[in-house]
C-alpha cells in the first residue's frame, strides 16, 4: 500500500481499494496502522471536479518523510558526509561537477529510450524510464504543457542540502527532451512531489488540436 501511495501520490481509502482490489474497510484499517506508525499523514483531497454525496468528507493519505525513508534512503548519511567532505576539502565547484556528472550519467542511461521517440511522446517515455529507476514518475496534462511528476526521490535528503543535484537533473531532462523545462517543485524543498513542467511547442499544440477534432468527429 505504501508503494501504491508513493507511485500515485496522495490517495483516499476508496481510491486505494480500487487499485489494490480490496474493500475500503480493509484499506482503512491498514491506513490507520500506517498512520500510527508515522508512515502516512492526512493530506488535502485532490479536487477532480467530481461532486461528493452526503456523509463524512473523504480523507486522503500521503507519505511522510519516514514513509519515504522506507525506500532506498539508508545511504543518505554516507552521501551527505561524502559531499560535505568534498565541499570542504576541494570546494563548491567540485560539488557542482559531481552533480553534473550524475546528470550526465542519467542522460546516458535514459537518452537511448527517448531519442527515437516523437517529441510529443517524450515526456511520457521519460516518466516511464524514471519509474523504472525508482522515482515513481508519472505525467499529466497542465495548462499549456505537460508535467512530469516524481512521487519519490531516493536522494531527497541529500538534495535538500545540495540543490545542485536537482539543478543538474533538470538540465539533463531539458537535454533529453530537446526542450526548455521548468522545475516547479521538489521533494527536497518540502513539496509532496518533484514537478517538472514542459511547455507545449507549436507542433504539440497542433497535434493536440487535431486529436481533439478527430474525437469530436467520431462522436
Image: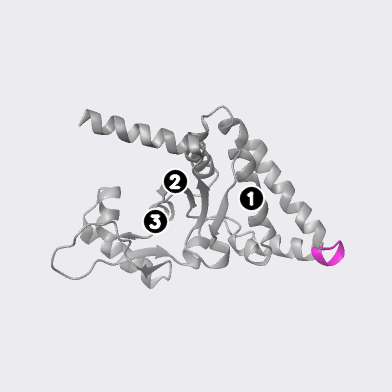
Which label lies toward us, 2 or 3? Answer: 2
Residue linked to disc 2: 139
Q: Residues within 10 Å of mark 1 (few under 14, many from 20)?
A: many
User: Dot 2 lies on which element?
Assistant: strand
Q: Earlier in the sequence, mark 1 or mark 3?
A: 3
The dot on residue 5 is 3
Point out residue 58 in the picture as x, y percentages from the top left corner: 24, 66
The overriding secondary structure of the stretch rendered in magenta is: helix
Q: Residue at x 47, y 55 (%)?
A: 151
Residue 10 x/y as whole percent: 37, 60
Compared with 21, 96 (above or below) is below
Q: Residue at x 61, y 38 (%)?
A: 178
Q: Is residue 16 magenta?
A: no
Magenta stretch bounds: 87-91
> Relative to residue 9, is residue 54 depicted above or below?
below
* Figure check: 45 above or below 204: below
Q: Please give the name of the residue rendered at 43% of the width and 66% of the height, measured from the top-left corner.
A: 39
* Numbered circle sitting on residue 169: 1
Q: How far, Cα to Cα, is label 2 from label 3?
A: 16 Å
Q: SS of the residue at dot 3?
A: helix
N-terminal-most mark, 2 or 1? 2
Q: Which mark is residue 94?
A: none
Q: Quadrant of the C terminus?
A: top left
User: Which residue is found at the position 27% from the left and 60% from the top?
Assistant: 13
Q: CA distance from mark 1 to mark 3?
A: 24 Å
Tell which of 48 and 131 is nearer to you.
48
Amino acid at each position: 500500500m505504501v508503494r501504491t501511495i508513493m507511485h500515485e501520490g496522495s490517495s483516499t481509502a476508496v481510491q486505494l481499494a480500487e487499485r489494490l482490489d480490496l474493500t475500503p474497510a480493509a484499506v482503512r484499517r491498514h491506513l490507520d496502522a500506517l498512520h500510527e506508525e508515522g508512515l502516512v499523514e492526512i493530506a488535502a483531497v485532490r479536487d477532480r471536479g467530481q461532486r461528493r454525496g452526503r456523509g463524512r468528507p473523504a480523507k486522503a493519505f500521503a507519505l511522510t518523510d519516514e514513509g519515504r525513508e522506507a525506500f532506498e534512503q539508508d545511504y543518505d548519511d554516507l552521501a551527505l558526509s561524502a559531499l560535505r567532505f568534498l565541499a570542504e576539502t576541494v570546494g563548491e565547484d567540485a560539488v557542482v561537477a559531481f552533480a553534473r556528472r550524475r546528470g550526465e550519467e542519467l542522460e546516458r542511461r535514459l537518452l537511448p529510450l527517448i531519442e527515437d521517440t516523437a517529441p510529443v511522446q517524450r515526456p511520457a517515455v521519460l516518466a516511464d524510464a524514471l519509474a523504472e529507476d525508482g522515482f515513481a514518475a508519472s505525467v499529466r496534462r497542465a495548462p499549456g504543457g505537460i508535467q512530469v511528476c516524481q512521487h519519490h526521490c531516493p536522494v531527497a535528503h541529500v538534495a535538500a542540502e545540495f540543490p545542485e543535484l536537482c539543478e543538474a537533473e533538470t538540465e539533463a531532462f531539458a537535454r533529453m527532451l530537446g526542450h526548455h523545462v521548468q522545475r516547479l517543485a521538489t521533494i527536497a524543498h518540502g513539496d509532496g512531489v518533484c514537478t517538472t513542467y514542459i511547455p507545449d511547442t507549436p507542433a504539440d499544440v497542433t497535434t493536440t488540436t487535431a486529436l481533439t477534432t478527430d474525437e469530436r468527429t467520431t462522436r
